[in-house]
Amino acid sequence: MPALSTRTGSEIGLYELLSVLPSQLQPHVENADDRSFLHAMFGQRSLHSLVKIHEKLQCYEDCSPTPVLDSASSLAQDLSEELQGHGASGEIRELVKLLSKPHVKSLLAVHDIVARKSYDPELPPLPDDIDDEEDSVKIIRLVKNKEPLGATIKKDEHMGAIVVARIMRGGAADRSGLIHVGDVLKEVNGIPVDDKKPEEIISILAQSLGAITFKVVPGLKEEAPNKHPKMFVRALFDYNPAEDNAIPCKEAGLVFRKGEILQIMSQDDATWWQAKQEGNGNPRAGLIPSKHFQERRIAVWKPLTVSLPQRTPSKRFSGLRRSFRLSRRDKKTNKSMYESKKSEQYDTADVPTYEEVTSYRRKQGERHRLVALVGPTGVGLNELKRKLLISDPQHFSVTIPHTSRSKRQSESDGVEYHFISKDLFEADIQNHKFIEHGEYKGNYYGTSFDSVRSVLSKNKVCLLDVQPHTLRHLRTAEFKPYVVFVKPPSIERLRETRRNAKVVSGKDDKSSSKPFSEEDFQEMINSSQMMENQYGHLFDKVIVNDDLTTAFNQLKQALRKVETEPHWMPIGWTHS
């Protein structure tokens, strides 16, 4: 056979030799099947990768520094004693003094320790009791500290064996690359596990620190790669795996709170996803219930209808609000008083589980997000809104509501209200042009979608306070609402801070007002709890109005961050 190259073996690398080998062998192989076999064999990526690794290791072995001797300390001591018996020249005295310094002696001692130690990796010895007839096994040794192993196991119903059920992304087992889904576990630290329950094996692992040795039979099917792209979700509920009896392994679960951002690492299991908290330095993923599984569970837990709490009759009407809201009395006496595009029936298609989000930052010149303020009557929404308007009237603005009542002499159309006929108002209701609407003393009042668009088109931030169940109609890519829930403090604090405050009883009867009653305080607390329980997953920010100035500063700071800093937003809103 002719030479493959005029260069010697030391001049040509093994990887380069492997690359040219098929073409050099081709003239000497007549059979087409043999040629195809050689091309397939020498063209395998795994073979090329192994050769590359071999060359890197060979290069390291050739170039790695090795100590000349491992007795520098004794050599320095001998030299110092030898020099003391010779002439007393300045150079000799300086050298003897240098070798006698404590830090030089310590440095040479450390050199000797390092030089005598072998840093080459050592594989654990193979067990002596491996049966020649036994299936091919892998002996795996992992170093475990306080970090969980990052794998779950189960008992295979058909084989009766303990198998690896899943590998947690980013965990110790995943990073090792040695353990795979489907591997059959035979021993842990020399203890046979064929006759043990998964709980007993987990207990053995939990008590083990340092090196853990596994004896496994490789599974026939390797773990499927994660085919899903990177996905982030906002959790819309609290979750604690310790309280979930359905989770296959409580220790592998991930604790999270409503509103936290989770990165979904794997959706291979239709019931249990793998996720980790965004911004958390822990690389290990944990188990969380999948969206479909959690929706099914909540649909079973929750009733199909959600009833608002019963309210006692009162003359109060939210007169200070620009966005329309009915009095408690009128809600009970007029069935057509308050309507929306959808009923308040529990919507099983909108079960709060996870919402896919993406990082968003407002671009220069882009429309501002609608700011929706939500809270119980009397909590101070109107006062916060007024303070924002006063703080920067060129930046913040409010909508102008519509009404069917007659215009008074001191009013101007498009200033206090948009005055339209009752017939036109009813036609706009049928055409779903209102966010909220209702009737008071025979006249319609309402806030239209177009009034919000008018504010946003002027490059201003639209401030809108609404009933929470209308948020679903505002949560669109057009408005991108930033929802702030303002909740009251404790009832004791309400008695202290609202002692001299009054409530207005009617929208067009602002002269009629009365002090807060104990009933008003209790209703504010109850209404706040109902709103948070039922609609809390839609709130971006929660502010307790304990002190108006403090609450205002918190609100203004939050709105500034929304305009200037990256934040998470439903992924569908970025494709408007």
Image (cartoon, rainbow, N blue to C red):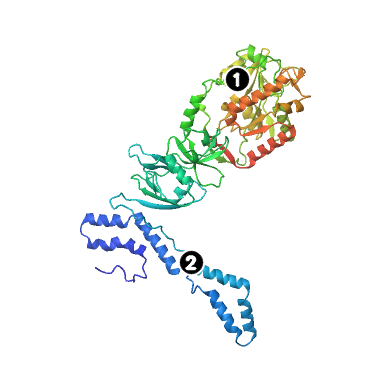
Can residue 421 be seen from the camera position used here? no
Query: Residue drawn at (48%, 31%), measured in percent from left and top?
Result: 294
Residue situated furthest right in the rendering: 500
Can residue 181 be seen from the camera position used here? yes
x, y (%) of residue 143? 47, 53
Query: Residue drawn at (56%, 31%), measured in percent from left and top?
Result: 476
Mark 2 or mark 1, earlier in chain: 2
x, y (%) of residue 281? 55, 47
Element carrying mark 2: loop
Answer above or below: position of 148 versus 158. below
x, y (%) of residue 128? 34, 56
Label 1 is placed on what type of residue? Leu
Element carrying mark 1: loop
Q: Quadrant of the N terminus?
A: bottom left
Task: Name the mark on residue 117.
Answer: 2
x, y (%) of residue 470? 59, 25
Estimate how packed mark 1 is, as few (under 14), some (14 to 19) or many (20 or more) residues with alpha carbons within 10 Å: few
Label 2 is placed on what type of residue? Lys
Answer above or below: position of 33 versus 195. below
Closer to the eye: label 2 or 1: 2
Which is more toward the observer, 273 or 33? Answer: 273
The quadrant where residue 550 appears: top right
**Residue bearing mark 1:** 308
Which is more toward the observer, 54 or 383? Answer: 54
The quadrant where residue 556 appears: top right
Left or right side of 133 for 340: right
Query: Residue drawn at (63%, 74%), measured in percent from left and top?
Result: 101
